């Protein structure tokens, strides 16, 4: 047996939840074995959350967009070199250690070469990050990585549309015993912020870190005990009523004002606002935080 994390979109504070999947592990490093493990994790997750859609984000993903959403392939624009490179390259090139860095030459190599460059292990303690002449902290944990990944996804609308269809994410390559930065977690945060109408705040790091920091205490407390049982949530607490939406319904958002629902999906709504255009929003969040008017 093995345990791997599944990161769920949380449409309230904090912006994600971690659920541990217990599954029968298929040994071996071959891609076929990793794909079997992905399938096992997803089947275990779906047994407990049949209403949730889960996406594997890694180079081993068998789902549409799963590979392209991985940090090795997701492009991030770097103005100083006037082109986009992978999130992985930007992240590794931005590291600053007591004995060196940032190693900006890593922007021009392959993602794997950037990740395995020996200087990243031989330059002392990690003390910060730099990107485009700006300094970034190492705390809260994974803040710089999350900032890069979410902004890169914000810049790539087609990939963002794929991510927004899902409620949970996995990464078979992520080892929580060795690393704190995870693309599956960052994707869950992106979807949560998008559904809550907060995604524009990620463009500015100071605004982003305020959102992130306000949730750290809640998140640490939530990890002190299992977030979810291994059986279905419904067996532990009453299921919240599902608000029925229809295309044409009018809502009132506290920031964006009047909006008209143009499309209803399993867990999301497409809402066209008079002020900011069409947005994807979580139907549960809309039901709890927006005023619902009758259809037009």
Image: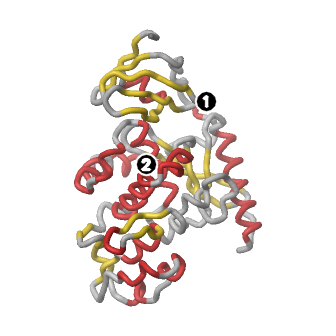
Residue positioned 61% across, 50% down in the render: 55
Asked if residue 266 is positioned above or below residue 293 in the image, the reply reads below
SS for tag 1? helix
Left or right, residue 15 beside residue 167: left
Residue 20 % position (x, y): 57, 52
Q: Which residue is mark 2?
A: 189
Residue nearest the viewer, comparing 262 with 123: 262
Residue 105 % position (x, y): 39, 84
Q: Residue furthest front?
A: 82
SS for tag 2? helix
Mark 2, mark 1: which one is toward the viewer? 2
Q: How many marks?
A: 2
Asked if residue 92 is positioned above or below residue 21 in the image, the reply reads below
Q: Which residue is mark 1?
A: 235
Residue positioned 57% across, 43% down in the render: 166
Instruction: Determine which quarter of the picture holds residue 49.
Output: top right
Quarter that holds the N terminus = bottom right
Asked if residue 17 is positioned above or below residue 145 in the image, the reply reads above
Label 2 and label 1: CA atoms lie apart by 27 Å
Residue 18 % position (x, y): 50, 50
Q: Dot 1, how many residues are within 10 Å of its Cα: few (below 14), some (14-19), or many (20+)?
A: few
Instruction: Give the colour scheme shown.
Output: secondary structure
Residue nearest the viewer, comparing 191 with 256: 256
Residue positioned 71% across, 74% down in the render: 29
Q: Earlier in the sequence, mark 2 or mark 1?
A: 2
Instruction: Determine which quarter of the picture holds residue 197.
Output: top left
Q: Dot 2, how many residues are within 10 Å of its Cα: few (below 14), some (14-19), or many (20+)?
A: many
Quarter that holds the C terminus = top left
Residue positioned 26% across, 54% down in the render: 204
Residue 99 % position (x, y): 29, 89
Q: Are discs 2 and 1 less than 8 Å apart at CB? A: no
């Amino acid at each position: 047996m093995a345990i791997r994390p599944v990161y769920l979109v949380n449409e309230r504070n904090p912006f994600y939840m971690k659920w541990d999947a217990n599954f029968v592990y298929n040994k071996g490093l071959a891609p076929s074995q990793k794909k079997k493990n992905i399938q096992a994790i997803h089947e275990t997750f779906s047994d407990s959350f049949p209403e949730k859609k889960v996406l594997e984000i890694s180079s081993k993903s068998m789902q549409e967009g799963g590979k392209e959403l991985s940090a090795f392939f997701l492009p991030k624009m770097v103005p100083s070199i006037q082109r986009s490179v992978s999130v992985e390259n930007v992240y590794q090139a931005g590291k600053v250690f007591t004995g060196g860095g940032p190693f900006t030459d890593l922007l021009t190599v392959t993602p794997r070469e950037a990740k395995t460059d020996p200087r990243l292990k031989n330059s002392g303690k990690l003390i910060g990050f730099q990107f485009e002449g700006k300094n970034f902290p190492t705390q809260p944990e994974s803040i710089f990585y999350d900032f890069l990944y979410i902004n890169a996804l914000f810049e790539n609308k087609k990939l963002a549309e794929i991510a927004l269809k899902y409620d949970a994410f996995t990464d078979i390559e992520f080892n929580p015993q060795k690393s704190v930065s995870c693309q599956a977690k960052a994707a869950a945060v992106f979807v949560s912020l998008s559904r809550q109408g907060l995604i524009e705040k990620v463009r500015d790091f100071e605004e982003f870190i305020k959102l992130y920091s306000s949730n750290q205490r809640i998140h640490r407390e939530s990890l002190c005990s299992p977030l979810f049982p291994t059986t279905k949530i419904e067996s532990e607490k009453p299921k919240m009523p599902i608000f029925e939406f229809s295309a044409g319904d009018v809502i009132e958002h506290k920031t964006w004002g009047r909006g008209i629902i143009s499309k209803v999906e399993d867990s999301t709504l497409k809402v066209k606002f008079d002020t900011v255009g069409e947005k994807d929003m979580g139907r549960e969040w809309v039901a709890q935080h927006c005023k619902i008017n009758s259809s037009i």
